Image (spheres, helix red, strand yellow):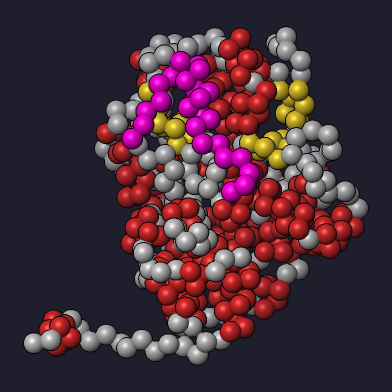
Amino acid sequence: MSQTQAREKTDPPMQAIQPGERNRTLLAEIKKRSGTDFNRCYQCRACANGCPFVQAMDFPPNVVLRLLQYGMYQQVLECKTIWVCAGCHTCSSQCPMAIDIAGVMDTLRLLAVEQGVAIAKPNILDFHEEVLRSLEYYGRAHKLGIMWRYKVRTRRWFSDMDTGLKMLAKRKLDLRPSRVSAINEITDLFKCYWREAR
Amino acid sequence: MSNFEQLNFSYFPGCSLATTAAESNASMMKAARILGFNLIELEDWNCCGSSSAQTLCKNLALSMAARNLSLAPAGRPLVAMCPRCLHYLRHAQACLQKDPEIHRELEERWARPIPLDLEIIHFLEVLVRFGLDRLKQKIKRSLRGLRFVPYYGCSVFRPPDLERQKYYQGEMENILTVLGAESIVGAYTHRCCGSFLSATDPELVTPLVNEIIDSAVVAEAHCLVTACAMCQLNLEIRCSSQVKLPIFHFSEVLALALGAEDYEEWFIRHLVDPRPLLQKLYLVA
């Protein structure tokens, strides 16, 4: 029995990889914005081994790079990985080919928002937007307000309540936000495209 | 209080030190005063942009950080304690150096100069560059017996676009060892604390934080000392291990060694009370 036949017997059939049409403009855009050439990746998996969050990802970082090399943008922009990545740069510092993988993830998140694709971890995008709302109003992050609005938005009312109460009891969450005086200088900055697009 | 020549610095607190980590701010200010460093808070500073602005709009992130640079008077370095703030401020400056057009546009927008040669440094660098002699003269309490894991987190020296700038690897150990404490090797010192995932996906962060704390327990450390206020918070609120170690802000341990007496105000804000440990070591009454 050949190896292929043996594998067919045990493994569930995998969807064949359909390399995407190589959209060279988008490819060049990702390279330019992230300032890194992901074509250098030869799948050593150092990034996947080092990433603290790999278990919560649908594709390990090396696979994201491989999908990009294949031109499979849709899968990449719609995956959880790019949102779970916290940008700690462990992967970038371990990559033997000096690919700034976290930089690529950063670029992909932006592209996903810009292109309006389905976001695989909508709660994380919700959180970032609530932080920005706080920054727009006050110029500074008002954490209690952010968490409150985030809970309203995601309807995760009771999850993690004990932590919030502990932080309140330790007076770590200020009730009143601190505000920048020249707030117009801040709100002017928020006339960015991403908000108009939504 | 101090017989040293006063050195002036601009100081960017950032949102964490202004709120959740007020104890880090207070203890750093205390230590700075004892050492003769005059930290002058940037007037009307705003958030550095944080990872949220970085995620959603690069222009917004750049201009938010740049506004802070436009508020900094020339002629004295800008000091930050939060590693992420430091990173975003430096990153913005690097962008403006590369792009004179945006630099000019932002200067015109606020009608203020944005100095491109402004030195942006971490508080650790202030200590190492200007404070080593002062430290030795001002030490009041020896930290002898305190076994600590230096926990840097991911931001103080990792971001690749700043790789040609100063890292701060080893500086916490250098300073705290001078003050008598014992640095423990073998625990996780740079593993990411979970950052914003601690707010959005706590169930994901808890096992990681437990690994970090457990590694310190196994290495027989008494505590962890962090360089980052967000790390400190995440390590405290997300640890579900049975043995919980106190997590100090670096500035707290520093100020304690320099004889600060208002430590009660800082330590009551901790979720893991560090006072029993310090009492056991006769560091506080």
User: Which span of residues is magenta-colored?
Assistant: B163-186
Q: Nearer the viewer, residue B180 or B235?
A: B180
Q: Is residue A78 visible?
A: no
Q: Relative to A147, is B88 on the left or the right?
A: right
The outermost residue toward the left is: A1
Q: Nearer the viewer, residue B83 or A152?
A: B83
Q: Is residue B148 above or below residue B284?
A: below
Q: Is residue B88 above or below residue B280?
A: below
Quadrant (top left/top right/bottom left/bottom right) for the C terminus of chain B: top left
Q: Residue at x 36, y 64 (%)?
A: A44
**Which of the 4 image quadrants contains residue B13?**
top right
Q: Is residue A55 visible?
A: yes
Q: Residue at x 55, y 36 (%)?
A: B168
Q: Is residue A79 magenta?
A: no
Find residue B98 and report its horizontal and vertical position in percent: 76, 58
Q: Residue at x 76, y 23 (%)?
A: B7
Q: Is residue B169 magenta?
A: yes
Find residue B12 and report its horizontal and vertical position in percent: 70, 39
Find residue A19 and report its horizontal and vertical position in percent: 43, 87
Find residue B229 and report its horizontal and vertical position in percent: 54, 39
Q: How many marks?
A: 0
Q: Residue at x 54, y 9 (%)?
A: B140
Quadrant (top left/top right/bottom left/bottom right) for the N terminus of chain B: top right
Q: Is residue A180 above or below residue B42?
A: below
